[in-house]
Amino acid sequence: MLKILGRFMLAGALVVVPATGFAQREKISNDLSKCSGGAGPAVMVQVKGFKQASGRVRVQSYEATSAKWLKKGQWINRIEVPAVARGKTVSVCVPLPAPGSYGIAVRHDMDGNGKSGWNDGGGFSGNPDISLLNLKPSANKSAITVGQGVTRISVVLNYREGTKIEPLD
């Protein structure tokens, strides 16, 4: 018998089980039914403040711990949807593995190239202030508590204007 710590074979596929007990780095579709009555744990994110209806919006969930928050490769779920016009809102349902403390990061990739750029917008759960010197708020400022049901939040996008990063309106 082959024994590999933290990994096992399942139907011919290698599955990695992180120390927290739930899968990470899963790209999923925006299934709003996972945020309907009786669903959860999940976060229904209302993203608003779009600069323009081009590109894609990426919503990622993280454990709200300093060791995991916004660290490369530490996101739990990633959902990408098309951007919407200024003044419009997009709803994204982010299912989570268990009740707990999480953070949500949102990026509006305006040119849709999959890379962060100066013209892209972004925001976080809790809508903390960000600046050119502090693009990544702390886990404490962005943490939300998620229970068994659906937690509803609003994230307002921020864009760079000169030397400031702030919402459009």
Image (tube, helix red, strand yellow):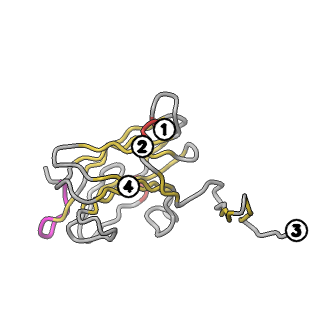
Q: Are marks 2 and 1 in contact (CB under 8 Å)?
A: yes
- In what element is the residue under mark 3? loop
Q: Are marks 3 and 4 in contact (CB under 8 Å)?
A: no
Q: Which quadrant, please, contains the N terminus?
A: bottom right
N-terminal of the pair, mark 3 or mark 2, is: 3
- Residue at 40% x, 53% y is 104
Mark nearer the viewer, 3 or 2: 3
Disc 3 marks a residue whose amino acid type is Met
Q: Are marks 2 and 4 in contact (CB under 8 Å)?
A: no
The residue range painted magenta reads: 161-167
Other-residue count near label 2 (Cα within 10 Å), few / some / many at <14 / 14–19 / ≥20: many
Q: Which residue is mark 4?
A: 80
Q: CA distance from mark 3 to mark 2?
A: 41 Å
N-terminal of the pair, mark 3 or mark 4, is: 3
The answer to whether residue 162 is magenta is: yes
Report the disc number at residue 10: none
Disc 4 marks a residue whose amino acid type is Glu
N-terminal of the pair, mark 3 or mark 1, is: 3
Report the disc number at residue 1: 3
